[in-house]
């Protein structure tokens, strides 16, 4: 039975991914900062789900992650780097720099550090799958997306470079790039708890859902071992990439 580590498992994509993969018959380690939510999830999902309190920005905790895992969960076969966040929608010259740093520490440093800790075991066993949660924001710029988009562009390129470094080994890497997805805490976090502002993002839009992403990952991990999806961009039908803009008579 393959072991999966899902970061950011206490809500949104992460929670939906854990539920789906447990239903599919995997053993799942669900990690997040909020242990209470993970404990509630464990009570529901049973003994094949292991709750793990982990902040991916805490270096020592990530370094010692494998040491604290019980037998049966130590060999991680599938790593799903889902933990991440967006903060703020201000333009670059008005943005909160602390928000920028938090996004970099979580979306970039946390993801690459955890990957570096888990990857040697996969290489040793010549088996594994790394799935990174990127974003269409890493492909297409939008006003106020500045550092968030840049962090997701890093995830896209890091994923591609991992594939190159793992050439000749039986380890797969996929970058999933979701567009507008509702029903999660993403916009509530981005707008620092302003529910009205968050709700307005999804008003009258048939958005994709966390279950859509979970079902996509379920399909990916079930594909044949010789089959690799390098990147997968997913948008609701209601969304398209923005067209080029022209500002006339700039003075």
Image (cartoon, rainbow, N blue to C red):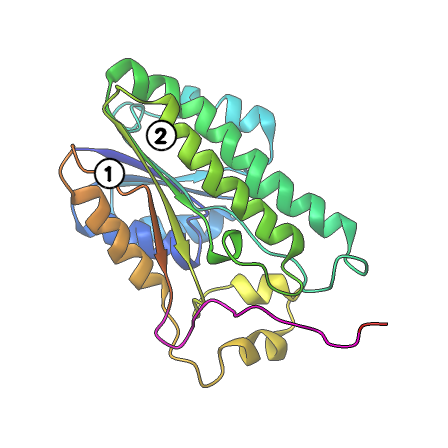
Residue at horizontal 76%, vertical 48%?
98
Instruction: Classify residue 106 as left or right of residue 74.
Output: right
Q: For mark 1, give the secondary structure.
A: loop
Image coordinates for residue 177, horizontal then vertical, percent: 41, 53
Image coordinates for residue 96, horizontal then vertical, percent: 78, 55
Question: Does residue 229 show up magenta in the picture?
Answer: no
* Vertical side of 169 occupied by 13: above or below: below
Magenta residues (range): 236-249
Task: Please report whichever mark, 2 or 1, sits nearer to the chain's N-terminal start.
Answer: 2
Q: Quadrant of the rendered structure where residue 6 is?
A: top left
Closer to us: 192 or 178:
178
- Residue corresponding to mark 2: 163
Toward the top, the furthest residue is 124
Q: Quadrant of the rendered structure where residue 216 is?
A: bottom left
Contact between labelled residues 1 and 2, with CB atoms less than 8 Å apart: yes
- Residue corresponding to mark 1: 228
Task: Please tell me how crowded label 2 is: few (under 14), some (14-19), or many (20+) other residues with Cα within 10 Å.
Answer: some
Using the numbered discs, state the Cα–Cα distance from disc 2 to disc 1 in whole angstroms: 10 Å
Image coordinates for residue 103, horizontal then vertical, percent: 63, 47
Type of secondary structure dominating the magenta stretch: loop
Res. 152 mark: none
């Amino acid at each position: 039975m393959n072991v999966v580590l899902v970061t950011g498992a206490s809500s949104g994509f992460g929670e939906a991914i854990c539920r789906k993969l447990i239903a599919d018959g995997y053993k799942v380690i669900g990690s997040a900062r909020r242990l209470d939510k993970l404990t509630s999830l464990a009570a529901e999902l049973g003994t094949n789900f292991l709750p793990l309190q982990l902040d991916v920005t805490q270096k020592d905790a990530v370094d010692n992650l494998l040491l604290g895992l019980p037998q049966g969960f130590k060999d991680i076969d599938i790593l799903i780097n889902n933990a991440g966040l967006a903060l703020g929608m201000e333009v670059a010259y008005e943005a909160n720099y602390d928000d920028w740093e938090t996004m970099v520490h979580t979306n970039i440093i946390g993801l690459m550090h955890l990957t570096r800790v888990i990857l040697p075991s996969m290489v040793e066993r010549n088996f594994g799958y790394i799935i990174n949660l990127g974003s269409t924001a890493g492909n297409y710029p939008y006003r106020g997306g500045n550092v968030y988009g840049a962090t997701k562009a890093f995830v896209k390129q890091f994923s591609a470079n991992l594939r190159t470094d793992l050439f000749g080994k039986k380890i797969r890497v996929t970058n999933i790039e979701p567009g507008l997805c509702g029903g999660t805490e993403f916009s509530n976090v981005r707008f620092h708890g302003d529910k009205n502002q968050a709700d307005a993002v999804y008003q009258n839009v048939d958005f994709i859902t966390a279950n859509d992403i979970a079902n996509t990952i379920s399909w990916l991990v079930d594909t044949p071992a010789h089959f690799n999806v390098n990147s997968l961009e997913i948008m609701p039908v209601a969304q398209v990439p923005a067209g080029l803009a022209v500002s006339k008579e700039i003075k």
